Structure formats: C-alpha cells, structure tokens
C-alpha cells in the first residue's frame, strides 16, 4: 500500500499472535482486500460442530462466488497451532524424559546411601536393644536420622526449582510454569525412597537377636 494514502480507522481489534504462539502480539493493521493484496488469503470459519465436515461446504460457497479461485491448505486451527509450537513440545518432551530419568536416579541414589548407612549401624542397634531400647525406639531413631537430611535437601531443591521456573515463562504458552502436582510427585518419590531405605534394612536388623548381632559385628 502507498504510504502517502490516508486511511480511516474504523475500529480497534484485540491482540492476535499472528506469527507464533510463542511470540508476543505486535502492531498489526487490518486493511480491506480491495485496498491492498498481500498474496495468499486465509479464510477463517467458526463452527459449533466438526470443522472437517464443513470444509466441503465452505469450498463450494467460494467456488460459487469465483469458480477460478484456488482452494488449498484446509486445516483446523488446532493443527495450525500445533505447527507453531512443535519445537517447544519436542523440547518439553525431551526435558520431561530427562527429568523422570533424573528422578529415578536420585531415588536410587538416596535409597542406596541410606540403606548402606543403616546396615553399617547394625552393631549399634544390637547394643541399644541389649541395654533396653525397644524396636520402636530404634525405628524412630533411624527414621529421624535418615529422613531429616532428605527433607532438608527436598526443601532446598523445591525453593531452587520455584526460582528456576521464572526463566521458563517465556518458553511456554498457555501452560503454567508452576506445576504443584509434578513437584509434589517428585518430593513424594524421594521421601518414599528414603523411607524404604530406612525401614527395609532396619526391619531385617531388628529380626536378629542382639547377642548374635554383637558377635557378628
């Protein structure tokens, strides 16, 4: 359009992400097709039913107006939206898979370290039981000593995770960067691994006679 032509503004439209869902809306001007021609023209049709069933009717209506008009690239809006964010979705899938793998490795690491620490204290448990400590006392001691550092680590990691999600806000669209379900699931998995690492070895140790545990140590 000639820049010297004066145009009359007849309305103001809302923001539209015309380039990509990940790109913030920019300044756009809607002009009449009779005033300017930008090449290919896109026709957007809203329907309450299945849009695929309406494609034939829309194409027939266009050919009634202009039989020589070519019609191509007929797709629903969900497909066009998916086309603009496929890279973000692929990256999210890869990062999500790595996150799950990291969580599994972290849980196995927590279990291995705590289980080894509990097994190494078998002689101590025998001494405590020999001088009158009950099984409940020993269990409480192991759980406190084992879960306290894990809880501290989970708390610190959660704070860092909440701070880190701020850097991801510009990489996603229509999805909150804070997912309490995923965060809670990760925390629960680590706590369960820590609890299992504490309970399984100590339960085996408590089934052994204190005198036998002292002799074998």
Image (cartoon, grey):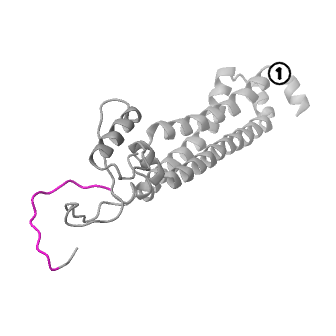
Image quarter for residue 151?
top right
Q: From the viewer's perspective, is residue 142 above or below residue 17?
A: above
Q: Main secondary structure of the magenta part?
A: loop
Residue 123 visible in the shown view = yes
Q: Nearer the viewer, residue 29 or 44?
A: 44
Residue at the spot 58% in from the left edge and 51% down from the top edge: 95
Taking the view exactly as shown, the residue that stands out farthest to the right is: 216
Residue at the spot 47% in from the left edge and 51% down from the top edge: 83
Residue at the spot 58% in from the left edge and 40% down from the top edge: 148
Residue at the disc numbered 1: 208
Q: From the viewer's perspective, is residue 126 above or below residue 57?
A: above
Q: Answer few, some or many: residues within 10 Å of disc 1's Cα (few below 14, many 20 plus, some between 14 and 19).
A: few
Q: From the viewer's perspective, is residue 153 above or below residue 136?
A: below
**Numbered range of the magenta stretch:** 4-17
Q: From the viewer's perspective, is residue 42 above or below residue 189?
A: below
Name the element at disc 1: loop
Q: Quadrant of the C terminus?
A: top right
Residue at the spot 64% in from the left edge and 31% down from the top edge: 195
- Residue 11 lies within the magenta run: yes
What percent of the width, then of the height, locates residue 159?
Answer: 46, 50
Would residue 108 appear left or right of 184 to someone viewing this image? right
Q: In the rendered picture of this protein, how many numbered marks are placed on residues?
A: 1
What percent of the width, then of the height, locates residue 163?
Answer: 44, 55
What percent of the width, then of the height, locates residue 114?
Answer: 71, 39
- Residue 21 lies within the magenta run: no
Image quarter for residue 106?
top right
Q: Nearer the viewer, residue 86 or 217?
A: 86
What percent of the width, then of the height, locates residue 22?
Answer: 40, 57
Would residue 88 appear left or right of 110 to someone viewing this image? left
Taking the view exactly as shown, the residue that stands out farthest to the front is: 67
Q: Quadrant of the N terminus?
A: bottom left
Q: Nearer the viewer, residue 112 or 104?
A: 104
């Amino acid at each position: 359009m000639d820049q010297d032509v004066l145009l009359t503004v007849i309305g103001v439209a809302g923001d539209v992400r015309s380039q990509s869902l990940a790109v913030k809306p920019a300044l756009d001007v809607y002009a009449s097709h009779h005033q300017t021609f930008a090449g290919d023209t896109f026709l957007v049709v809203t329907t309450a039913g299945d849009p695929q069933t309406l494609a034939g009717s829309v194409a027939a209506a266009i050919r009634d107006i202009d039989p020589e008009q070519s019609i191509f690239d007929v797709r629903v809006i969900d497909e066009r939206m998916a086309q603009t964010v496929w890279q973000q979705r692929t990256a999210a899938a890869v990062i999500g898979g790595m996150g799950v793998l990291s969580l599994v490795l972290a849980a196995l690491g927590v279990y291995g370290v705590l289980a080894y620490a509990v097994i190494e204290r078998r002689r101590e448990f025998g001494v405590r039981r020999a001088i009158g400590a009950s099984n409940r006392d020993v269990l409480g001691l192991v759980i406190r000593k084992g879960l306290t550092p894990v809880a501290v680590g989970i708390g610190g990691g959660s704070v860092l995770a909440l701070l880190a999600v701020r850097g991801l806000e510009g990489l996603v669209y229509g999805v909150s960067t804070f997912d309490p379900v995923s965060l809670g699931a990760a925390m629960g998995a680590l706590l369960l691994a820590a609890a299992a690492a504490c309970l399984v070895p100590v339960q085996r140790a408590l089934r052994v006679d204190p005198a036998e545990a002292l002799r074998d140590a």
